[in-house]
Image: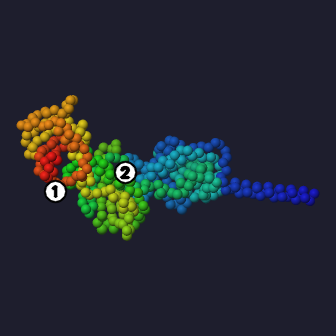
Amino acid sequence: MVRTNMMWSAVLLVLAGLGAAWLRLGAATPEVMGPAPIRLVTPEEIEGLRSIEVISGDGAASRVERVEGVGWLAPGDAGARWPVRAETLQGFLGMLSRERARPTEASSQPITRTLRLRGEGDGVSVEFAGEGTGGLWAVRIERGGERAWAVVDGDLGAIVRSGLEAWRASSLAPTPPGRSVEIDLRSLSGTIRLARSENGWRLTEPGPHRATAASADRIVAALSGTEVVSWEAAAVDEETPPVATITVAWDAFGEEGRRWRQDVVIHGAGDAEATTLIATSTLHSGDEVVWGPMTARVASTALSALSTAPEAYLPRRPIGVGADAVVRAEISRPDGADVVALQRAPGGWTVASRADWSPDVEAWRRALGALTSPVSSGVALRRPEGVGPAVARVRVSGSDDADMTVHTAEGDATT
């Protein structure tokens, strides 16, 4: 009998312990109860979102907002704004669209942070209680003046807890929604200006000369592809001349006459070994600052593709299109006399007008192939040493017009 009583006492002690543990677990993890889960945010509310704000328990707030014609901008230093990471924003919106809030009892824990989603209407306010446990978070949802307690996934709470400052893009010069039309690159070694025309890019300083689209794209890609090592809160010395400045003008998509101006200023080395650079980046629309100015430390190798050598922007073939795109050619003496015109016809090249001499059409076909092929020896703005006298002038027309003078190599009348 005594042994039986002892056994029952042990069982009761075990059950009492389990009951106490269950009560503790119930107090720590929000209890899901009541009706079926509901959407935390409706698809219409996500589509109409204009701002996302996170307010911590001490009242500190961070905010991202949607600017018409620009996109989503995140907070930066000293009140500046900066584009958000597209993948971060889309990931958050996707999480909101999938989140299902499950009704629960009111939490006794204090409100530690608030998520406010604003659109055209009153929006949605989600207040997070405590720090979340067991992969769940008790929240108080307010919409249209009505409040209700629910449980949401802890991942949403973790994003809200981290704030929105980390949402900003890490590119030194995020690409605005538009088409680049002008590029101005200045450094201690020289100045390069490029402008887009109906016939492609032109090198206007020094110039004018034809420029390749690839060389212009290379500058834009170097800026947008430069990753920020760290953001610098300290102000730069405005009185010290910059090492380089890069300005890219963009025609805004869908907005006639509106133009962005992207300014990047390289102030100098960011460390004693010059492995990093200090740069400030700003985007303007007229006199208005759209985003920035933000000062950052970037790797010095990131901008190594930028050059003020004009030859880096010139096409590497005399005629910037393939031979099939040339439809007419005029060959004359260097002074323009004795012009012979050749015209492309269905059966090949024919002589359209004749002077006192007659060209070899087959030789012209071979020459055209050479003029439309990339050169391997490089290009130069000035006549290099070792070039002989001019022997002919060639003008071609088609999808890319060109006017050139043909010289012989010194001591060789065949090249």
Frontmost residue, 368 versus 225? 368
Colour scheme employed for the rendering of this structure: rainbow
Residue, disc 2: 175
Q: Who's the residue at 14% across and 52% down the image?
A: 410
Instruction: Locate the N terminus by quadrant.
Output: bottom right
Residue 235 seen: no
Residue 387 position within the rendered picture, expressed as x and y whole percent measured from the top left: 15, 53
Q: Quadrant of residue 341?
A: top left
Q: Identify the residue under disc 1.
A: 385
Determine crowd level at label 1: few under 14, some 14-19, many 20+ residues with C-alpha closer than 10 A: few
Left or right: residue 279 compared with residue 24? left
Which x, y percent locates residue 20? 75, 57
Is residue 14 toward the left or the right of residue 188 in the image? right
Question: Is 386 in front, or is 355?
Answer: 386
- What type is the residue that disc 2 sits on? Thr
Closer to viewer: mark 2 or mark 1? 1
Residue depicted at x 13% and y 33%: 352
Placement of 289 over or under 39, stated as above or below? below
**Is residue 157 toward the left or the right of residue 372 in the image?**
right
Q: Secondary structure at mark 2?
A: loop
Counting residues from the N terminus, which is met first, the one under dot 2 or under dot 1?
2
The answer to whether residue 190 of the structure is visible from this angle is yes
Q: Quadrant of residue 39?
A: top right
Quarter location, residue 371: top left
The residue tagged with tag 1: helix, strand or loop?
loop
